[in-house]
Image: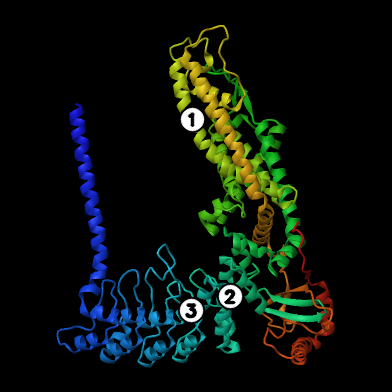
Amino acid sequence: MSALLAMGSSNLQSLFHRLRHRSVEYAVSMKQSEESCYKENPLFKAVKQNDMEMLEVLLAAKDVDPLITGPDGETLLHVALLFRHRTLALRLLDAVPAIINIPMTCELYRGETAIHIAIANENVVMVKELLHRGADITARACGSFFLPGKRCQCYYGEYTLSFAACTGNEMIVKLLMDHGASLITQDSLGNTVLHVLVLHPDRVLAVHMYDFLISLVHEGQRRSLESIRNAQGFSPLKLAAAEGNLAMFNHLMQKRKNIYWNCGPVRSAIYDLTDIDTWGDKNSILEIITSSKNKEARNLIGMTPIKELLHHKWKVYGFKYFIIWTVLYIFYILIFTVCCIMRPLQHVNRLDNATIMGSKQIRDSYESDWDYVRLMGEIITVLGAITIFIMEILYLMKNGPKKYFGNTVTGGPFHAIMMSYGVLVLVIVVLRVLTNDVEVIFMSIALILGWCNIMYFARGFSMLGPFTIMIQKMLFGDLLRFIMFLIIVLLGFSAAFHVAFDSLDSNIFIYFRNYPTTLFTLSQLMMGLKDLPIPNNMNLPAIIIVLYLAYMMFAYLLLLNLLIAMMGDTHFRVANERVELWKAQIAATTVLLESRVPRWLWMRSGIPGRELGLDGDRWYIRIEERKEMSPKRNCARDDDDDGGRGESPAKRKMSSTTKNWNIVHKNFANKFSQLHKMQNQPTVAKHSGSMD
């Protein structure tokens, strides 16, 4: 037998060796097939080695095809530009003009043409030559190498202009635009060149090129250019918020800012709320930030004017309606609890367990005055459950399952708890009509879920909000992992104990008489709620003592203390960000309340543009900012007015004065009629306090 096993193992080892050898040979052959084109084909070899003489001889031969392509669909011109052989590339263009716009065809580099490579290498001379010879500036590099995904190495927006902008080469950008490249062209994801710059990893380069591109268009075209939406419905500003690009977002907000007046370190700034406020925009920046899982996106909550706008909404409307919502829910859950406690019961004769009371028939449940009072409470409970269920379904359809269930900021598990509660109440109604005693099970679960959901309303208070975040992190992080391992341990040891006690008297060892009872007993032992329930004056099999010691060492000492250590680590890790998460929850709650409260109960935040002499269709928020200035600086001077252009102080002062005078001049005609309105409008001071 051992000989057969030895022979079988040797055969298996031999088979594995042959399979491994063949797989290595296959991988090597695939790699060699990619390089064989350059080694065996004389044209590709000449281009790669920059051998002009050999190339001339081959191009003069009649049996040589100059439009030959490599394994990735690359042409000779692609290879020449990749290896930066400019003279050889120009010779190829002279000899084979049709090669200029041939794209690569493989899945990885599909659509890439010669001009894409020249732009990526910032070869200005070659770009000029290619444009002069008729290179297609609308060619799209749409292979997986250039699109967001696992294989993406550089998402440059597919088009040549986006490639040039991402390299930061202003000269190439001008050349392309002089030859008709458009800033409004959108790639397969709907992104324009401005969107692509927002996604660029080099923040400084992206901001610089964004300003450079905007400076190339007329003033009237800038607003329409910056308002183009991609496939996700994001403008460049919204995309910066969604990606958490703080540098680009702050830069774009500063470009949208108007200075109303200056006085030393204090100035009144007016920010455009278009795309920011939720009023009339279901995909606003506030919605994007509060529903995002991106930590960088949540950091925007502390930036101007997001912080001031949210603070105004919460203080003026949000906190008041939140208190009303909290009180109504507590009152509602109290009604549900009383109705459950006072449910109609009658005596029953059950021999299988200790049950002596059961549900009454529906026709006998409403006889006394108290029964009709309870009926009113039950109607309120059912109507409330239906309302909760419908609202949660609508919220789920709006945000999708991923944001609905897995986002701590927007509610995390509480939305799922409330949906489950609504379903359970409806199930209880059906069981009550059918007079089924199983309703007590669903009623107990519904009571637990309903009361646990009160923790959701703790987010409105600074003392309790961060604490509930810690509970969520531990409950759905550490405790969930602990329970998964604990279930495995309990099932295994319960089976072992059941086998050990199966041969003993079950009347004496009643806590181990069957498998479910043994499982329950071991769970109590693990929590330290019970000692080992066996008589002290009886001799037990040694295996039971060994199992007990092993179980207590593994389950009680190891797993339980590991849970405590994990919770401590989570507390240390979350402690630094729980205040930030709590403020994000306040913001999400504000946005949620604004979407559910009728418009006539929640006025629009901000100041209409017509009252400021600005665009009448837009709304603005006025923020008083304080900036540290040198004591030697003049009170009327604003060091940001020149934008770093090196203008003289007199010119800067004149420019600032003219700008402010234009605003005042537009408002002068309506000054007296609008003065009272301006006093009633919200003026938000820039602060750093909490949102509660």
Answer with mark 1 or mark 2, whichever residue precedes in sequence: 2
- Rounded to the nearest angstrom, the CA distance separating label 3 from label 1 is 57 Å
Give how far across and how far down residue 513 sits, in percent. 49, 16
Identify the disc placed on residue 167.
3
Q: Nearer the viewer, residue 127 or 671?
A: 127
Give how far across and how far down residue 543 sits, in percent. 46, 16
Contact between labelled residues 1 and 3, with CB atoms less than 8 Å apart: no
| Residue type, mark 1 in image | Val
SS state under label 2: helix
| Residue type, mark 2 in image | Val
Q: Residue furthest top?
A: 537
Answer with mark 2 or mark 3, whichever residue precedes in sequence: 3
| Residue type, mark 3 in image | Thr
Residue placed at 39% from the left, 87% from the top? 126
Mark 1 lies on residue: 489
SS state under label 1: helix
Residue placed at 68% from the left, 33% from the top? 371
Mark 2 lies on residue: 204
Identify the disc placed on residue 365.
none
Residue placed at 64% from the left, 61% from the top? 595
Q: Look at the picture and state if 133 lies above or below 143.
A: below
Q: Nearer the viewer, mark 1 or mark 2?
A: 2
- Rounded to the nearest angstrom, the CA distance separating label 2 from label 3 is 12 Å
Answer with mark 3 or mark 1, whichever residue precedes in sequence: 3
